[in-house]
Structure formats: C-alpha cells, structure tokens
Amino acid sequence: MPETITERGSRSGAEAASGPRTDPGAAGPAPAQEAAFEAKIAADERIEPRDWMPDAYRATLVRQIAQHAHSEIIGMQPEANWLTRAPSLRRKAILLAKVQDEAGHGLYLYSAAETLGTGRDELLDKLHAGRQKYSSIFNYPTLTWADVGAIGWLVDGAAIINQVPLCRCSYGPYARAMVRICKEESFHQRQGYELLHTLAHGTPEQHAMAQDAVDRWWWPSLMMFGPPDDESAHSAQSMAWKIKRHSNDELRQRFVDICVPQAEILGLALPDPDLKWNEERGQHDFGAIDWAEFKEVLRGNGPCNDQRLDRRRRAHEDGAWVREAAAAYAAKRALGAAGPGEAA
Amino acid sequence: MSTAPDPAAPAAPAAALALGDDALVLSHRLTEWTGHAPVLEEEVALANIALDLLGQARTLLSLVGDEDELAFRREERAFRNVQLVEQPNGDFARTIARQLYFSVYQELLYGQLAAGAGGEPAGALAPLAAKAVKEVAYHRDHAEQWTLRLGDGTGTSHARMQAGLDALWRYTGELFRPVEGLALDWAGLAAAWRETVGGVLERATLTLPEGPRGTGWSAGAGREGVHTEPFGLMLAEMQHLHRSHPGATW
Ligand SMILES: [Fe+2]
Ligand SMILES: [Fe+2]
C-alpha cells in the first residue's frame, strides 16, 4: 500500500502506557534493547506490548492492524445491503451472524492496535478523514443475493489465506486476535460456498445469478493479495520482522490453486480464459491482473468508495450525541461513587 | 400459499403466530441498524438481540407452518404482530424506547408462559418461553442501561429519549389485549409492566408518558391484522427476493 503513517501513536492504551518508551528526542535506543528485540524475532518469540520495539516496527503494525480493523467494519456494508432482503429466515440468520462477527473482528483488532498506543477514536478519525485505508474489495457493489455467497467464498476465502500466516505474526496481541478471527472466517467461507452451491444447483435464474457474481468478484479477489512482489512497498521489511511470512504472489497462487477445484464442484466457471494447470510448476497459470483498475480503486475511484466512506462518517456523526450521553452518564456515576454523599 | 390463519385452527398456533410475528418484525427492524449504530459495541449488541428474536420467530412460526411461507408469502393484513414492533427505528433513542417497552412486555409474557400459565393450549409454547425468557432478560437489561444513559446523560439525549418514549406510548396499550388462546393474567401483566417501565424511567430522570393508549385509533389493532403504513414498505423489502423466484430453494 502506498500510504504510510508518519506520525507516532499517542500511546493512550493502558497496556502500552505502562511499557518502556522509545524516545524520539534521544539519539537512538540502547544497543542492548535493540539486540534483545532482534534476538526475539530471530528465535520466533512473540513481541509483547511492554517490550521495547523499534518505532518503525510499531508504526508498521499500527498501519496494518488499523487497515485490517477498518476493513472489517467497512466490510459490513456490502453484506448488510442484503440483510433486509435475505430470501429465507435461515439465510438471514446466517448472514446476520456473519455481519455481527465482522463487527466483533473490528473490536478485537482495534484493541490490538490500542496495545501499541493508538486508540480506536484516533484510528476512526483517520479512516473518516481518508488518511487510512481499508481493503479495496469493499469498494465493489453487491448487486444480487448471489454476491453474498461470492463474498463468503472468495473474499473471506482470500482473507483466510492472507490471515492464517498472521496467526504466527511476531507481535503477540495481533497474532492472538488473528487466531480467533481465522476460525470465524473459515465458517464464513464455508457458508458462502454452500450458499453459492445451492444457487448453482437451483433454478436456471439462480444459476445465472451465481455465475454473474463469480464473474464480478473473481478478479477483485485476486487483487486482495496486494500488488505483485516486485512492486510491494513494505514487503521486505515486514518479512524481516516476521509480521509477514509469505509474499503477495505466493499467497495469490495458493488461492488460485484452492479455488479452481472448488469452482468445478460448484459447477461455475472462473472468468479467466488463461487459467490452466501447469504440469511443470505443479500450479495453475492464470491471466494478467488489471493493476490499473486496482490503483484506481485504491486512489478512491472505485464504484463505491464515496458511498462506503460517507455512510461510515454519517453513522459516526449521527451517533456522536449517543457517545456523548454515555460518557456524561459514566462521569456522573463516577462522581457519585467518589463523592461523600450517596447517589440515589 | 397461506394468506391468513385458518379460523378453525387451534388456539396455540394463533398465539404462536402472534408472538412469532412480534419477534420476526422486531428482529427485522433491528437488522436495519447494521452499519449505522452509534458505536461498534452496539453493532454487536443490536445484532445479538436481532438474532435472538429471529431464532424465537423461527421456532414459533414453525409451530404454525412453514417458516418461510409464513414470513415471505403472507400479505400485510395476515400479520398478527403488535404495531409497536413495526414502528420505524427513528433515532437511537426511539429504538431504545421501543426496546424498553417491548422487552419488558416480552419478559413478563414469556415468564408467565415458562411458569406454565396460560392454560392447555399455551403448553406448546412453554419450552420456547423457558429458553427465550433468558434471552429477553438480556434485551431488557440492554434497553434499561441505555435508557439510563440517555435519560441521565446530556440535555440532548434526555430530550431525545423522552421524545422517543412519548411518540411510541400510543402503541403500548395494545400489548395488554389478550392474545387469542393465552389465558394469562393480562391485568397483572399490565400492572407489572407499568411498574417496571415506570421504575426505569424514574431512575433515568424521565417521565412515564400520559394520555390515551387504549382508546380509539391509538391502541392499534395489529393482532387483528391492521398495521401502520411503514409496515407495508418493510414487508415489500423483506419479501421481494423470495417472491421473485416462486418455488426456488435458497
Ligand atoms: Fe472478518
Ligand atoms: Fe468474514
């Protein structure tokens, strides 16, 4: 991703606040601290919030976790678009539980960022100001009910492939959050697949709906793994820090190889005439990705960028008086509890 | 296709339909909050409540017939929910007012059913009520906590909460009209409801609304299949996809 976070976190998190600090005014960390950090990384041990860590490591993690958290909450929108139109009560319950899970993922991840000293409010402000990103996949519209299935199968499926290695990420709180999240994402993937399977084996109209959804979501899903390795700005350092474990292209290839046989069982075609098994490589070859489209969407010019961000901002602004009321009420209670007189 | 409940059907299905429709419709209204909640924790909480209600609705409607036939293929006039649950969300305070009024009612109602009240026909509802009463206790607690925060929060939140309570008051009278087939202590339920809601409002520095709620038009007649205008639009959205593919499996 082209964006970098230049400012330091505010270190408002309770856990982080008690930890040792890096001092931006000082000449540099004590060599012993740096050596201890490097040794932990080399030994595959977890870095915890109280441990010393390089500023750039902290900033990289905050950027990545924030982007991930934002993706979870923005990602609720395209699916919520079908919640009120779900065609059976069973599907409605499954979809509602899924969207609720995504909100929960947002909560875990904002908490993980908090351990690095950056609070949720600050991150949300940056999201709303367009200064932090979320996954571009959510800037595509959900046009039919089958899109709910395609998102589960492909988007949650791609997310799992991206995220399973993060369960071994060097930063402890992030790795632990990812273990919980990955379990739920794999439910989402299976439910999406099952939804698509039902449509693909249903009426001709339902089958066409499923094929159309796969046609529209396939290429954007491949883009979820990020730019090709030779153009990926942050990859090398993240790999060295064991935040990232596999390259973008490696993960993309893994995804393609998993999806091809699944598409066959679904009875749906993947929209890529160049997709074929390569005996020599033992992997599938696939067609060229339209990176110009990827960059346009990333730049804010996708079909739904404005809509998603507007809705998020509006929800936040409309809810301001509620959050203020909750804070005022909590303050009154605290005052009442601390004061000499017993509150009624 | 079922359009209206069979008048010759036994009383328990009539009650299951009424209570099932309450849960179905309120669940739907709550899902409309998804992506709009004032804080992330409320996205989770409102979805949780909606999921509980949807589960209750599915159990209850299945006692009557096919849950999807009943949810997606009935006309507006065949729905038996009270008008309170179909009222649009409005702002967060209005939603909380609706939650408070309804969850206190539902907790008392399920409490009586779980305890074996209601006579012979209500017996079929006892297992559901025993499970649901625990869920509804959480819904009531959620509504109560927010009523306190909004009522005793800021001037703005107090005014909005009072406005929400006042606006929905006219729909509360209907809650205590006996549901066909349920020989419950309806007068006792109404008194307990008033005491509980009144107690919460007092602690929240709010006022129990006054005025008619059981006379003339204002009481509503949802249980007889007479609904308010926003309900038809809600059903149009909820039913359109299912109805667009007759006979399809989802
Ligand atoms: Fe998620
Ligand atoms: Fe997911």
Image: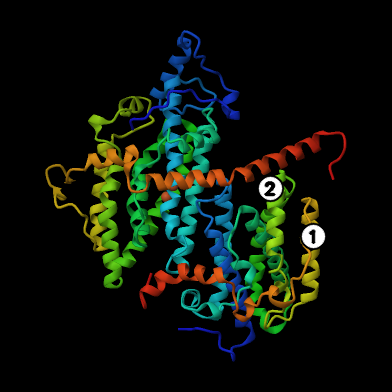
Point out residue A226 in the picture as x, y percentages from the top left corner. 30, 38
Q: Identify the image quadrant of the C terminus of chain A.
A: top right
In the rendered view, does A225 fall on the left or right side of A16? left
Q: Residue at x 28, y 34 (%)?
A: A247
- Observer-nearest of A254 and A46: A254
Q: Is residue B13 above or below residue A335?
A: below
Labels 2 and 1: the sequence-earlier one = 2
Q: Which residue is identified by label 2?
A: B157
State the image coordinates of residue A172 (x, y, percent, origin top left). Answer: 48, 32
Q: Mark 1 points at which residue?
A: B198
- Asked if residue A44 is positioned above or below residue B171 in the image, the reply reads above
- Residue drawn at 49 percent across, 58 percent down: A96
Secondary structure beneath label 1: helix
Which quarter of the figure is the N terminus of chain A placed in? Answer: top left
Q: How far apart are marks 2 and 1 (CA)?
A: 18 Å
Q: Nearer the viewer, residue A324 or A272?
A: A324
In the image, taking residue A100 as reference, residue B13 lies left or right, namely right
Name the residue at 51% across, 25% down: A9
- Per the image, label 2 sits on a secondary structure element best described as helix
- Decide which of A73, B61 is in the foreground and name it: A73
Q: Label 1 marks which chain's residue? A: B
Q: Identify the amino acid type marked 2.
A: Ser
The answer to whether residue A182 is seen in the rendering is no
